[in-house]
């Protein structure tokens, strides 16, 4: 069925958004979202480490993520 439609069965559809650099800073390009798969968690972990090391204030770190869910995850992990 996928071939009839000209779509590969092994590629997930793009979200239709603009391809952009991943927000975690890895240098990879997203498929249209803010992060590559799993890189949102990587970014939160990096920010938590920076907060714990005293390199970044918690609220500055929270300002670096876009979704409310990631902000809550970051605040909880940094406690």
Image: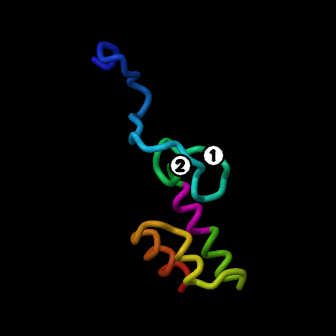
Quadrant of the drawing holding the N terminus: top left
10 left or right of 42 in image: left
Q: CA distance from mark 2 to mark 1?
A: 8 Å
Main secondary structure found in the magenta portion: helix
Q: Which residues are magenta?
A: 39-45
Q: Which residue is mark 2?
A: 36
Asked whether the beta carbons under mark 2 and mark 1 sit within 8 Å of each other, the answer is yes
Membership of 57 in magenta stretch: no
Position of 4 relative to 79 (above/below)? above
Mark 1 nearby-residue class (10 Å; few <14, some 14–19, many ≥20)? few
Q: Is residue 48 above or below residue 22?
A: below
Please provide percent x and percent y for residue 31: 49, 41
Q: For the point 59% across and 80% down, which residue is it?
A: 60
Q: Is residue 13 above or below residue 59?
A: above
Q: Residue at x 53, y 62 (%)?
A: 41
In the structure shown, which secondary structural element does the residue marked by tag 1 occupy?
loop
> Residue 11: x percent and y percent?
44, 29
Q: Which residue is mark 1?
A: 28
Q: Residues within 10 Å of mark 2 (few under 14, many from 20)?
A: some
Q: Which mark is residue 19?
A: none
- Horizontal and vertical percent for residue 49? 66, 75
Quadrant housing residue 25:
bottom right
Which residue occupies 59% across, 68% down? 45
Which of 15 and 46 lies nearest the eye of the viewer?
15
Name the residue rendered at 49%, 81% in the picture. 75
What is the x, y in percent for residue 55? 72, 81
Query: Is tag 2's residue or tag 1's residue first in the polypeptide sequence?
Result: 1
**SS class, disc 2:** loop
């Amino acid at each position: 069925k996928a071939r009839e439609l000209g779509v590969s069965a092994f590629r997930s559809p793009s979200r239709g958004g603009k391809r952009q650099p991943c927000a975690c800073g890895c240098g990879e390009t997203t498929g249209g979202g803010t992060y590559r798969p799993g890189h949102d968690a990587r970014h939160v972990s990096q920010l938590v480490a920076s907060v714990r090391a005293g390199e970044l204030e918690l609220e500055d770190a929270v300002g670096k993520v876009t979704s409310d869910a990631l902000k809550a995850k970051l605040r909880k992990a940094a406690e």
